[in-house]
Amino acid sequence: MTPSTSSQEPVGSSASSVLEIDINEGILIQDADQKDDTVESDDVTVTGHVEQPNSSEENKRTLRDQLRKTLSQSKPVHSATRSRRDITLNEQDIIASKVAGYEPRSYFVLTDAGKPVFFSRTAEDDVDNTTSMIGVMQALISVFLDDNDKLRCINAGRTRINFLLRPPLYYVCISSWGEPESVTRTHLEYLHLQILSVVTASQLRRIFERRTNFDLRRLLNGAESFLLSLLKRLEFDFSMTLTSLHCLRLRPSLRKRIADALVPQSKAKDILYIMLVAWGQVVTLIRPRKHSIHPADIHIILNTIHSPSIYDSPAPSSWIPVCLPKYNSQIFVNAYISFLRREDEHNSSSTQQNQDCSRAQLQSVALVCISSGGDMDLIRGWCNDAAQKLESEGTLDELINSCQTRQSSYVVSDLGIPGLRHFIYKSRRHVQITMPAFEDPYEDATSRRRLVTLYQILHDAIHAKSGQDGTLKLQYIRTDKESLLGWITQPFEIYLSLSHRLPKTAAINAANAVVNWIKKEETQLFLQDAPVF
Protein backbone atom coordinates (compact mmCIF):
# COMPACT_ATOMS: atom_id res chain seq x y z
CA MET A 1 0.00 0.00 0.00
CA THR A 2 1.27 3.45 -0.86
CA PRO A 3 0.47 6.67 0.94
CA SER A 4 -2.64 8.43 -0.27
CA THR A 5 -3.26 12.13 -0.54
CA SER A 6 -6.43 14.15 -0.49
CA SER A 7 -6.15 14.74 -4.22
CA GLN A 8 -6.93 11.09 -4.77
CA GLU A 9 -10.23 11.43 -3.01
CA PRO A 10 -13.29 12.11 -5.17
CA VAL A 11 -14.28 15.34 -3.48
CA GLY A 12 -11.03 16.41 -1.94
CA SER A 13 -11.36 14.66 1.41
CA SER A 14 -9.45 11.81 2.97
CA ALA A 15 -11.20 11.87 6.31
CA SER A 16 -13.08 8.78 7.36
CA SER A 17 -16.54 8.85 8.85
CA VAL A 18 -19.43 6.80 10.12
CA LEU A 19 -22.88 6.69 8.56
CA GLU A 20 -25.55 5.42 10.90
CA ILE A 21 -28.91 4.69 9.30
CA ASP A 22 -31.19 7.10 11.05
CA ILE A 23 -33.45 5.06 13.31
CA ASN A 24 -35.83 7.98 13.77
CA GLU A 25 -36.90 8.15 10.14
CA GLY A 26 -40.24 6.47 9.56
CA ILE A 27 -42.25 5.91 6.44
CA LEU A 28 -45.59 7.66 5.93
CA ILE A 29 -44.97 10.08 8.80
CA GLN A 30 -43.67 13.61 9.00
CA ASP A 31 -39.92 13.51 8.37
CA ALA A 32 -38.48 15.91 10.92
CA ASP A 33 -35.07 17.43 10.33
CA GLN A 34 -32.37 15.13 11.57
CA LYS A 35 -28.91 16.04 12.79
CA ASP A 36 -26.17 15.15 10.38
CA ASP A 37 -23.77 12.39 11.30
CA THR A 38 -20.53 13.52 12.87
CA VAL A 39 -17.02 12.17 12.65
CA GLU A 40 -15.73 10.70 15.85
CA SER A 41 -12.44 11.99 17.14
CA ASP A 42 -10.81 8.57 16.94
CA ASP A 43 -11.22 8.27 13.17
CA VAL A 44 -7.98 7.46 11.43
CA THR A 45 -6.76 6.91 7.91
CA VAL A 46 -3.97 4.36 7.76
CA THR A 47 -1.36 4.15 5.02
CA GLY A 48 1.77 2.09 4.66
CA HIS A 49 2.93 -1.45 3.99
CA VAL A 50 1.81 -4.23 6.33
CA GLU A 51 3.27 -7.72 6.40
CA GLN A 52 0.89 -10.57 7.11
CA PRO A 53 1.10 -11.45 10.81
CA ASN A 54 0.69 -14.81 12.44
CA SER A 55 -1.03 -15.47 15.75
CA SER A 56 2.03 -15.03 17.97
CA GLU A 57 2.17 -12.12 20.37
CA GLU A 58 5.63 -11.18 19.12
CA ASN A 59 4.41 -10.64 15.56
CA LYS A 60 1.38 -8.80 16.83
CA ARG A 61 3.60 -6.42 18.76
CA THR A 62 5.75 -5.99 15.65
CA LEU A 63 2.68 -5.14 13.60
CA ARG A 64 1.53 -2.65 16.23
CA ASP A 65 4.92 -0.97 16.31
CA GLN A 66 5.04 -0.81 12.52
CA LEU A 67 1.59 0.76 12.33
CA ARG A 68 2.43 3.29 15.03
CA LYS A 69 5.60 4.22 13.18
CA THR A 70 3.64 4.69 9.96
CA LEU A 71 1.03 6.84 11.71
CA SER A 72 3.63 8.96 13.46
CA GLN A 73 5.22 9.76 10.10
CA SER A 74 1.88 10.66 8.50
CA LYS A 75 0.08 13.92 8.90
CA PRO A 76 -2.94 13.46 11.17
CA VAL A 77 -6.22 13.63 9.30
CA HIS A 78 -9.23 14.00 11.56
CA SER A 79 -11.31 16.39 9.52
CA ALA A 80 -11.40 17.80 6.06
CA THR A 81 -12.48 21.15 4.81
CA ARG A 82 -14.63 21.58 1.80
CA SER A 83 -15.84 25.11 1.43
CA ARG A 84 -16.13 25.07 -2.36
CA ARG A 85 -19.66 24.89 -3.70
CA ASP A 86 -18.57 24.38 -7.30
CA ILE A 87 -16.24 21.54 -8.21
CA THR A 88 -14.76 20.74 -11.60
CA LEU A 89 -13.70 17.12 -11.68
CA ASN A 90 -11.70 15.10 -14.12
CA GLU A 91 -13.54 11.88 -14.78
CA GLN A 92 -10.46 9.87 -13.84
CA ASP A 93 -10.59 11.41 -10.37
CA ILE A 94 -14.11 10.11 -9.87
CA ILE A 95 -14.17 6.60 -11.25
CA ALA A 96 -11.82 3.84 -12.22
CA SER A 97 -10.45 3.94 -15.74
CA LYS A 98 -12.45 2.41 -18.56
CA VAL A 99 -9.68 -0.12 -19.08
CA ALA A 100 -10.03 -1.42 -15.54
CA GLY A 101 -13.78 -0.96 -15.59
CA TYR A 102 -15.72 -1.19 -12.35
CA GLU A 103 -14.06 -4.15 -10.73
CA PRO A 104 -16.61 -5.70 -8.37
CA ARG A 105 -16.28 -4.53 -4.81
CA SER A 106 -15.17 -7.16 -2.32
CA TYR A 107 -17.13 -7.59 0.90
CA PHE A 108 -16.01 -9.60 3.90
CA VAL A 109 -17.72 -10.55 7.14
CA LEU A 110 -15.69 -12.14 9.92
CA THR A 111 -16.06 -12.72 13.63
CA ASP A 112 -14.00 -10.91 16.23
CA ALA A 113 -12.06 -14.17 16.61
CA GLY A 114 -11.07 -14.02 12.95
CA LYS A 115 -13.46 -16.73 11.71
CA PRO A 116 -14.75 -16.12 8.15
CA VAL A 117 -18.51 -15.67 7.87
CA PHE A 118 -19.12 -14.38 4.33
CA PHE A 119 -17.21 -12.99 1.38
CA SER A 120 -18.72 -11.84 -1.85
CA ARG A 121 -16.12 -13.27 -4.23
CA THR A 122 -15.60 -16.98 -3.73
CA ALA A 123 -13.40 -18.23 -6.55
CA GLU A 124 -12.05 -21.63 -5.55
CA ASP A 125 -8.54 -20.78 -6.66
CA ASP A 126 -8.56 -17.69 -4.44
CA VAL A 127 -9.55 -19.32 -1.16
CA ASP A 128 -6.04 -19.22 0.32
CA ASN A 129 -5.63 -15.56 -0.56
CA THR A 130 -9.02 -14.72 0.94
CA THR A 131 -8.18 -16.58 4.13
CA SER A 132 -4.90 -14.69 4.38
CA MET A 133 -6.67 -11.36 3.84
CA ILE A 134 -9.17 -12.12 6.59
CA GLY A 135 -6.29 -12.91 8.93
CA VAL A 136 -4.64 -9.57 8.17
CA MET A 137 -7.95 -7.71 8.61
CA GLN A 138 -8.60 -9.28 11.99
CA ALA A 139 -5.05 -8.52 13.14
CA LEU A 140 -5.27 -4.89 12.03
CA ILE A 141 -8.56 -4.38 13.81
CA SER A 142 -7.25 -6.06 16.97
CA VAL A 143 -4.16 -3.85 17.06
CA PHE A 144 -6.28 -0.73 17.22
CA LEU A 145 -8.81 -2.19 19.65
CA ASP A 146 -5.97 -3.08 22.00
CA ASP A 147 -5.16 0.62 22.11
CA ASN A 148 -8.82 1.57 22.61
CA ASP A 149 -8.90 2.92 19.08
CA LYS A 150 -10.95 2.12 15.99
CA LEU A 151 -9.69 1.32 12.53
CA ARG A 152 -12.14 2.90 10.13
CA CYS A 153 -10.44 3.19 6.76
CA ILE A 154 -7.27 2.37 4.84
CA ASN A 155 -6.43 4.32 1.69
CA ALA A 156 -4.09 2.62 -0.76
CA GLY A 157 -3.88 4.62 -3.97
CA ARG A 158 -7.31 4.47 -5.60
CA THR A 159 -8.36 1.61 -3.36
CA ARG A 160 -10.14 2.23 -0.09
CA ILE A 161 -10.75 -0.41 2.57
CA ASN A 162 -13.62 0.35 4.94
CA PHE A 163 -14.13 -1.31 8.31
CA LEU A 164 -17.36 -1.46 10.29
CA LEU A 165 -17.25 -3.02 13.74
CA ARG A 166 -20.45 -4.52 15.08
CA PRO A 167 -19.15 -7.01 17.66
CA PRO A 168 -19.10 -9.94 17.52
CA LEU A 169 -18.98 -9.31 13.74
CA TYR A 170 -16.59 -7.22 11.67
CA TYR A 171 -17.48 -5.97 8.18
CA VAL A 172 -14.99 -4.95 5.50
CA CYS A 173 -15.41 -3.51 1.99
CA ILE A 174 -12.64 -3.08 -0.59
CA SER A 175 -13.52 -0.71 -3.42
CA SER A 176 -11.71 1.26 -6.12
CA TRP A 177 -14.79 2.96 -7.60
CA GLY A 178 -13.99 6.41 -6.20
CA GLU A 179 -17.21 6.73 -4.23
CA PRO A 180 -17.22 8.58 -0.87
CA GLU A 181 -16.41 6.53 2.18
CA SER A 182 -19.91 7.02 3.54
CA VAL A 183 -21.30 4.98 0.63
CA THR A 184 -19.45 1.76 1.34
CA ARG A 185 -20.07 2.25 5.04
CA THR A 186 -23.79 2.32 4.25
CA HIS A 187 -23.35 -0.94 2.34
CA LEU A 188 -21.71 -2.53 5.37
CA GLU A 189 -24.52 -1.28 7.61
CA TYR A 190 -27.08 -2.92 5.32
CA LEU A 191 -25.06 -6.15 5.27
CA HIS A 192 -25.23 -6.13 9.06
CA LEU A 193 -28.99 -5.56 9.01
CA GLN A 194 -29.48 -8.37 6.50
CA ILE A 195 -27.52 -10.78 8.71
CA LEU A 196 -29.60 -9.69 11.69
CA SER A 197 -32.70 -10.52 9.66
CA VAL A 198 -31.52 -14.15 9.69
CA VAL A 199 -29.83 -14.33 13.10
CA THR A 200 -31.16 -11.89 15.69
CA ALA A 201 -28.90 -9.69 17.79
CA SER A 202 -29.81 -11.63 20.95
CA GLN A 203 -28.97 -14.93 19.25
CA LEU A 204 -25.59 -13.59 18.15
CA ARG A 205 -24.81 -12.37 21.62
CA ARG A 206 -25.71 -15.67 23.29
CA ILE A 207 -23.83 -17.77 20.73
CA PHE A 208 -20.56 -15.88 21.02
CA GLU A 209 -20.77 -15.54 24.78
CA ARG A 210 -20.73 -19.33 24.93
CA ARG A 211 -18.25 -20.00 22.12
CA THR A 212 -16.07 -17.16 20.90
CA ASN A 213 -14.76 -19.24 17.98
CA PHE A 214 -18.21 -20.36 16.77
CA ASP A 215 -18.48 -20.89 13.00
CA LEU A 216 -21.45 -18.68 12.09
CA ARG A 217 -21.56 -20.04 8.55
CA ARG A 218 -23.50 -23.02 9.90
CA LEU A 219 -26.37 -20.77 10.97
CA LEU A 220 -26.22 -18.69 7.79
CA ASN A 221 -26.30 -21.74 5.54
CA GLY A 222 -28.70 -20.92 2.70
CA ALA A 223 -28.76 -17.20 3.51
CA GLU A 224 -25.87 -16.31 1.22
CA SER A 225 -28.32 -15.59 -1.61
CA PHE A 226 -29.91 -12.87 0.54
CA LEU A 227 -26.54 -11.18 1.04
CA LEU A 228 -25.50 -11.41 -2.62
CA SER A 229 -28.90 -10.11 -3.72
CA LEU A 230 -28.55 -7.18 -1.31
CA LEU A 231 -25.15 -6.24 -2.71
CA LYS A 232 -26.57 -6.17 -6.24
CA ARG A 233 -29.39 -3.88 -5.11
CA LEU A 234 -26.96 -1.54 -3.39
CA GLU A 235 -25.17 -0.84 -6.68
CA PHE A 236 -28.06 1.09 -8.22
CA ASP A 237 -30.84 1.50 -5.64
CA PHE A 238 -30.45 5.11 -4.53
CA SER A 239 -33.46 4.86 -2.22
CA MET A 240 -31.23 2.83 0.10
CA THR A 241 -28.59 5.58 0.10
CA LEU A 242 -31.28 8.17 0.82
CA THR A 243 -32.94 5.99 3.50
CA SER A 244 -36.24 6.24 1.70
CA LEU A 245 -38.81 4.29 -0.29
CA HIS A 246 -39.25 4.12 -4.07
CA CYS A 247 -42.94 3.53 -4.79
CA LEU A 248 -44.54 2.44 -8.03
CA ARG A 249 -46.02 5.25 -10.10
CA LEU A 250 -49.77 4.62 -10.18
CA ARG A 251 -53.10 6.38 -10.59
CA PRO A 252 -54.33 7.45 -7.14
CA SER A 253 -57.74 5.83 -7.70
CA LEU A 254 -56.18 2.46 -8.54
CA ARG A 255 -53.77 2.64 -5.61
CA LYS A 256 -56.69 3.39 -3.27
CA ARG A 257 -58.74 0.45 -4.56
CA ILE A 258 -55.78 -1.85 -4.01
CA ALA A 259 -55.22 -0.54 -0.49
CA ASP A 260 -58.90 -0.83 0.44
CA ALA A 261 -58.90 -4.46 -0.65
CA LEU A 262 -55.98 -5.21 1.66
CA VAL A 263 -57.22 -3.59 4.87
CA PRO A 264 -58.20 -6.29 7.39
CA GLN A 265 -61.92 -6.07 8.07
CA SER A 266 -61.62 -7.32 11.63
CA LYS A 267 -59.03 -6.46 14.22
CA ALA A 268 -55.93 -8.50 13.53
CA LYS A 269 -53.72 -7.83 16.51
CA ASP A 270 -50.88 -10.00 15.22
CA ILE A 271 -50.60 -8.30 11.81
CA LEU A 272 -47.86 -5.66 11.73
CA TYR A 273 -47.60 -4.63 8.06
CA ILE A 274 -49.24 -5.49 4.77
CA MET A 275 -47.44 -4.66 1.53
CA LEU A 276 -48.20 -5.14 -2.13
CA VAL A 277 -45.09 -5.10 -4.31
CA ALA A 278 -45.15 -4.92 -8.12
CA TRP A 279 -42.15 -4.97 -10.42
CA GLY A 280 -39.87 -4.61 -7.39
CA GLN A 281 -41.55 -1.44 -6.10
CA VAL A 282 -44.05 -0.87 -3.30
CA VAL A 283 -47.61 -0.27 -4.47
CA THR A 284 -49.15 0.25 -1.06
CA LEU A 285 -48.31 -0.28 2.59
CA ILE A 286 -50.93 -0.80 5.29
CA ARG A 287 -49.91 -0.48 8.91
CA PRO A 288 -51.41 -0.22 12.40
CA ARG A 289 -52.63 3.20 13.44
CA LYS A 290 -49.95 5.47 14.92
CA HIS A 291 -47.28 3.03 13.86
CA SER A 292 -44.55 3.55 11.27
CA ILE A 293 -42.02 1.32 9.58
CA HIS A 294 -38.39 2.22 9.05
CA PRO A 295 -37.26 2.37 5.40
CA ALA A 296 -34.34 0.05 6.18
CA ASP A 297 -36.77 -2.66 7.28
CA ILE A 298 -38.72 -2.20 4.04
CA HIS A 299 -35.53 -2.73 2.05
CA ILE A 300 -34.78 -5.89 4.03
CA ILE A 301 -38.26 -7.18 3.17
CA LEU A 302 -37.94 -6.25 -0.51
CA ASN A 303 -34.54 -7.89 -0.76
CA THR A 304 -35.77 -11.01 0.99
CA ILE A 305 -38.77 -11.60 -1.25
CA HIS A 306 -36.75 -10.98 -4.43
CA SER A 307 -33.80 -13.17 -3.46
CA PRO A 308 -33.45 -16.22 -5.71
CA SER A 309 -34.26 -18.69 -2.93
CA ILE A 310 -37.71 -17.08 -2.56
CA TYR A 311 -38.37 -15.50 -5.94
CA ASP A 312 -37.43 -18.61 -7.94
CA SER A 313 -39.21 -21.06 -5.66
CA PRO A 314 -41.84 -23.18 -7.45
CA ALA A 315 -44.18 -22.67 -4.49
CA PRO A 316 -46.72 -19.85 -4.99
CA SER A 317 -46.30 -18.73 -1.38
CA SER A 318 -43.73 -18.89 1.41
CA TRP A 319 -43.83 -18.52 5.19
CA ILE A 320 -40.49 -17.46 6.63
CA PRO A 321 -39.26 -16.06 9.94
CA VAL A 322 -37.47 -12.74 9.56
CA CYS A 323 -36.05 -10.19 11.97
CA LEU A 324 -36.73 -6.54 11.15
CA PRO A 325 -33.78 -4.93 12.97
CA LYS A 326 -35.20 -1.40 13.15
CA TYR A 327 -38.51 -2.71 14.46
CA ASN A 328 -36.90 -5.03 17.02
CA SER A 329 -33.46 -6.57 16.52
CA GLN A 330 -34.05 -9.13 19.28
CA ILE A 331 -36.99 -11.10 17.88
CA PHE A 332 -38.31 -12.77 14.75
CA VAL A 333 -41.57 -11.92 13.07
CA ASN A 334 -43.25 -14.02 10.39
CA ALA A 335 -43.50 -13.03 6.74
CA TYR A 336 -46.11 -14.62 4.52
CA ILE A 337 -45.18 -14.01 0.87
CA SER A 338 -47.64 -14.82 -1.89
CA PHE A 339 -46.96 -14.21 -5.58
CA LEU A 340 -50.21 -13.28 -7.31
CA ARG A 341 -51.34 -14.53 -10.71
CA ARG A 342 -54.22 -13.62 -12.93
CA GLU A 343 -56.88 -16.23 -13.67
CA ASP A 344 -55.72 -16.77 -17.24
CA GLU A 345 -52.23 -17.45 -15.95
CA HIS A 346 -53.50 -20.02 -13.47
CA ASN A 347 -55.15 -21.88 -16.35
CA SER A 348 -52.28 -21.56 -18.81
CA SER A 349 -50.14 -24.46 -19.97
CA SER A 350 -47.80 -25.83 -17.33
CA THR A 351 -45.09 -26.90 -19.71
CA GLN A 352 -41.52 -26.11 -18.74
CA GLN A 353 -41.19 -23.70 -21.66
CA ASN A 354 -44.19 -21.66 -20.57
CA GLN A 355 -43.02 -21.68 -16.98
CA ASP A 356 -39.61 -20.35 -17.96
CA CYS A 357 -41.01 -17.61 -20.22
CA SER A 358 -43.63 -16.38 -17.81
CA ARG A 359 -41.96 -16.82 -14.42
CA ALA A 360 -40.77 -13.21 -14.18
CA GLN A 361 -44.24 -11.97 -15.10
CA LEU A 362 -46.10 -14.36 -12.82
CA GLN A 363 -44.01 -13.44 -9.82
CA SER A 364 -43.86 -9.71 -10.44
CA VAL A 365 -46.71 -8.98 -8.01
CA ALA A 366 -46.26 -10.09 -4.42
CA LEU A 367 -48.51 -9.76 -1.40
CA VAL A 368 -46.55 -9.65 1.86
CA CYS A 369 -48.05 -9.91 5.32
CA ILE A 370 -45.80 -9.42 8.35
CA SER A 371 -47.19 -10.76 11.62
CA SER A 372 -45.95 -11.26 15.15
CA GLY A 373 -48.06 -14.38 15.65
CA GLY A 374 -47.62 -17.91 14.39
CA ASP A 375 -51.12 -18.68 13.09
CA MET A 376 -50.13 -19.44 9.52
CA ASP A 377 -53.56 -20.78 8.56
CA LEU A 378 -55.24 -17.54 9.62
CA ILE A 379 -52.76 -15.38 7.70
CA ARG A 380 -52.88 -17.63 4.64
CA GLY A 381 -56.67 -17.54 4.63
CA TRP A 382 -56.74 -13.75 4.87
CA CYS A 383 -54.15 -13.36 2.08
CA ASN A 384 -56.07 -15.75 -0.17
CA ASP A 385 -59.27 -13.77 0.39
CA ALA A 386 -57.49 -10.47 -0.32
CA ALA A 387 -55.91 -11.86 -3.49
CA GLN A 388 -59.26 -13.19 -4.68
CA LYS A 389 -60.84 -9.79 -4.09
CA LEU A 390 -58.11 -8.05 -6.12
CA GLU A 391 -58.68 -10.48 -8.96
CA SER A 392 -62.48 -10.55 -8.93
CA GLU A 393 -62.71 -6.75 -8.96
CA GLY A 394 -60.28 -6.51 -11.87
CA THR A 395 -57.79 -4.55 -9.79
CA LEU A 396 -54.98 -7.04 -10.27
CA ASP A 397 -55.47 -6.94 -14.05
CA GLU A 398 -55.29 -3.15 -14.06
CA LEU A 399 -52.12 -3.17 -11.98
CA ILE A 400 -50.34 -5.71 -14.18
CA ASN A 401 -51.45 -3.97 -17.37
CA SER A 402 -50.18 -0.66 -16.01
CA CYS A 403 -46.76 -2.20 -15.37
CA GLN A 404 -46.58 -4.08 -18.67
CA THR A 405 -47.52 -1.03 -20.73
CA ARG A 406 -45.02 1.10 -18.77
CA GLN A 407 -47.68 3.48 -17.48
CA SER A 408 -46.10 2.92 -14.07
CA SER A 409 -42.76 4.37 -15.17
CA TYR A 410 -41.57 7.44 -17.06
CA VAL A 411 -38.53 8.73 -18.91
CA VAL A 412 -36.81 12.08 -18.66
CA SER A 413 -38.06 13.14 -22.11
CA ASP A 414 -41.61 13.13 -20.69
CA LEU A 415 -40.69 16.30 -18.81
CA GLY A 416 -39.57 18.17 -21.92
CA ILE A 417 -36.73 19.99 -20.15
CA PRO A 418 -33.82 20.85 -22.49
CA GLY A 419 -30.47 19.38 -21.47
CA LEU A 420 -31.90 17.22 -18.66
CA ARG A 421 -30.57 13.65 -18.72
CA HIS A 422 -31.64 12.13 -15.41
CA PHE A 423 -32.64 13.07 -11.86
CA ILE A 424 -33.49 11.71 -8.44
CA TYR A 425 -36.02 13.57 -6.30
CA LYS A 426 -36.70 12.85 -2.63
CA SER A 427 -39.84 14.08 -0.93
CA ARG A 428 -38.67 14.59 2.63
CA ARG A 429 -42.23 14.73 3.92
CA HIS A 430 -43.11 11.34 2.44
CA VAL A 431 -39.60 9.86 2.88
CA GLN A 432 -39.88 8.63 -0.72
CA ILE A 433 -37.97 9.12 -3.96
CA THR A 434 -38.90 9.17 -7.62
CA MET A 435 -36.69 8.95 -10.68
CA PRO A 436 -37.08 8.32 -14.42
CA ALA A 437 -35.93 5.13 -16.10
CA PHE A 438 -32.32 5.08 -17.23
CA GLU A 439 -31.91 5.87 -20.92
CA ASP A 440 -29.23 7.25 -23.23
CA PRO A 441 -26.50 8.07 -22.25
CA TYR A 442 -26.97 5.86 -19.18
CA GLU A 443 -28.35 2.71 -20.78
CA ASP A 444 -25.34 0.47 -20.16
CA ALA A 445 -24.29 -0.70 -16.71
CA THR A 446 -20.93 1.09 -16.73
CA SER A 447 -22.51 4.47 -17.46
CA ARG A 448 -25.10 3.89 -14.75
CA ARG A 449 -22.41 3.08 -12.23
CA ARG A 450 -20.60 6.28 -13.16
CA LEU A 451 -23.77 8.33 -12.76
CA VAL A 452 -24.67 6.73 -9.44
CA THR A 453 -21.15 7.39 -8.17
CA LEU A 454 -21.50 11.07 -9.12
CA TYR A 455 -24.87 11.25 -7.34
CA GLN A 456 -23.22 9.71 -4.28
CA ILE A 457 -20.50 12.37 -4.36
CA LEU A 458 -23.16 15.09 -4.44
CA HIS A 459 -25.13 13.49 -1.61
CA ASP A 460 -22.02 13.04 0.52
CA ALA A 461 -20.97 16.67 0.01
CA ILE A 462 -24.40 18.13 0.78
CA HIS A 463 -24.87 16.09 3.95
CA ALA A 464 -21.22 16.32 5.08
CA LYS A 465 -21.01 12.56 5.51
CA SER A 466 -17.24 12.29 5.22
CA GLY A 467 -15.86 14.89 7.59
CA GLN A 468 -16.58 18.12 5.73
CA ASP A 469 -16.82 21.37 7.68
CA GLY A 470 -20.58 21.58 7.34
CA THR A 471 -23.61 20.75 5.27
CA LEU A 472 -24.44 22.51 2.01
CA LYS A 473 -27.69 23.61 0.42
CA LEU A 474 -26.35 23.45 -3.11
CA GLN A 475 -23.52 21.56 -4.79
CA TYR A 476 -22.47 21.72 -8.44
CA ILE A 477 -20.12 19.30 -10.20
CA ARG A 478 -18.88 19.37 -13.78
CA THR A 479 -17.16 16.52 -15.63
CA ASP A 480 -16.16 16.21 -19.27
CA LYS A 481 -19.41 14.32 -19.91
CA GLU A 482 -22.09 16.09 -17.88
CA SER A 483 -22.81 18.62 -15.19
CA LEU A 484 -24.56 17.65 -11.98
CA LEU A 485 -26.48 19.62 -9.40
CA GLY A 486 -27.46 18.67 -5.87
CA TRP A 487 -29.96 20.83 -4.01
CA ILE A 488 -31.64 20.36 -0.64
CA THR A 489 -34.50 22.34 0.88
CA GLN A 490 -36.96 21.70 3.70
CA PRO A 491 -39.54 19.89 1.51
CA PHE A 492 -37.29 18.11 -0.97
CA GLU A 493 -33.85 16.90 -2.01
CA ILE A 494 -32.91 16.69 -5.70
CA TYR A 495 -29.97 15.48 -7.78
CA LEU A 496 -29.80 16.16 -11.51
CA SER A 497 -27.59 15.18 -14.42
CA LEU A 498 -27.54 17.62 -17.33
CA SER A 499 -25.62 18.32 -20.50
CA HIS A 500 -22.18 19.66 -19.67
CA ARG A 501 -22.77 22.41 -22.22
CA LEU A 502 -25.48 24.02 -20.07
CA PRO A 503 -24.44 27.01 -17.94
CA LYS A 504 -25.07 26.89 -14.22
CA THR A 505 -28.08 29.20 -14.49
CA ALA A 506 -29.70 26.75 -16.90
CA ALA A 507 -29.05 23.93 -14.43
CA ILE A 508 -30.88 25.87 -11.70
CA ASN A 509 -33.78 26.53 -14.06
CA ALA A 510 -33.92 22.83 -14.95
CA ALA A 511 -34.05 21.90 -11.27
CA ASN A 512 -36.97 24.27 -10.70
CA ALA A 513 -38.74 22.82 -13.73
CA VAL A 514 -38.35 19.28 -12.38
CA VAL A 515 -39.70 20.35 -8.99
CA ASN A 516 -42.74 21.95 -10.62
CA TRP A 517 -43.41 18.82 -12.71
CA ILE A 518 -43.21 16.59 -9.64
CA LYS A 519 -45.65 18.81 -7.74
CA LYS A 520 -48.18 18.23 -10.52
CA GLU A 521 -47.57 14.48 -10.56
CA GLU A 522 -46.97 13.77 -6.87
CA THR A 523 -50.29 12.00 -6.30
CA GLN A 524 -49.14 9.36 -8.80
CA LEU A 525 -45.48 9.31 -7.84
CA PHE A 526 -45.77 9.00 -4.05
CA LEU A 527 -47.69 6.82 -1.67
CA GLN A 528 -49.91 9.21 0.28
CA ASP A 529 -52.56 8.65 2.94
CA ALA A 530 -52.31 4.87 2.94
CA PRO A 531 -55.03 3.32 5.11
CA VAL A 532 -54.35 2.10 8.64
CA PHE A 533 -56.09 -0.44 10.84
Image (tube, rainbow, N blue to C red):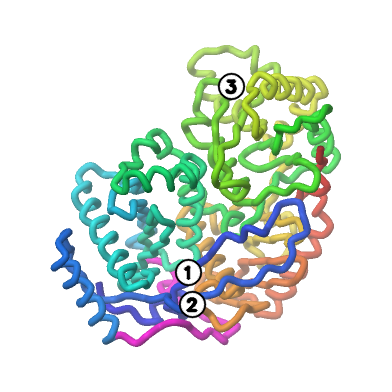
Three-letter code for the amino acid on which mark 3 is drawn: Pro
Q: Name the residue under label 1.
A: 180
**Point 83% across, 33% down: residue:** 260
Report x, y in % for residue 344. 68, 16
Task: Assign a secondary structure to mark 2.
Answer: loop
Q: Distance between the residues labelled 2 and 1?
A: 8 Å
Task: Assign a secondary structure to mark 3.
Answer: loop
* Foreground pick, 285 / 350: 285
Screen quadrant of the N terminus: bottom left
Q: Indicate which disc, 2 or 1, sits on the residue closer to the N terminus.
A: 2
Contact, CB < 8 Å: mark 2 with mark 1? yes
Mark 3 crowdedness (10 Å alpha carbons): few <14, some 14-19, many ≥20: some
Q: Mark 2 points at which residue?
A: 11
Q: How many marks?
A: 3
Q: Name the residue under label 3.
A: 316
Q: How far apart are marks 3 and 2 (CA)?
A: 48 Å
Q: Indicate which disc, 3 or 2, sits on the residue closer to the N terminus.
A: 2
Screen quadrant of the C terminus: top right
**Point 80% across, 32% down: residue:** 263
Mark 1 crowdedness (10 Å alpha carbons): few <14, some 14-19, many ≥20: many
Which segment is the magenta one? 74-96
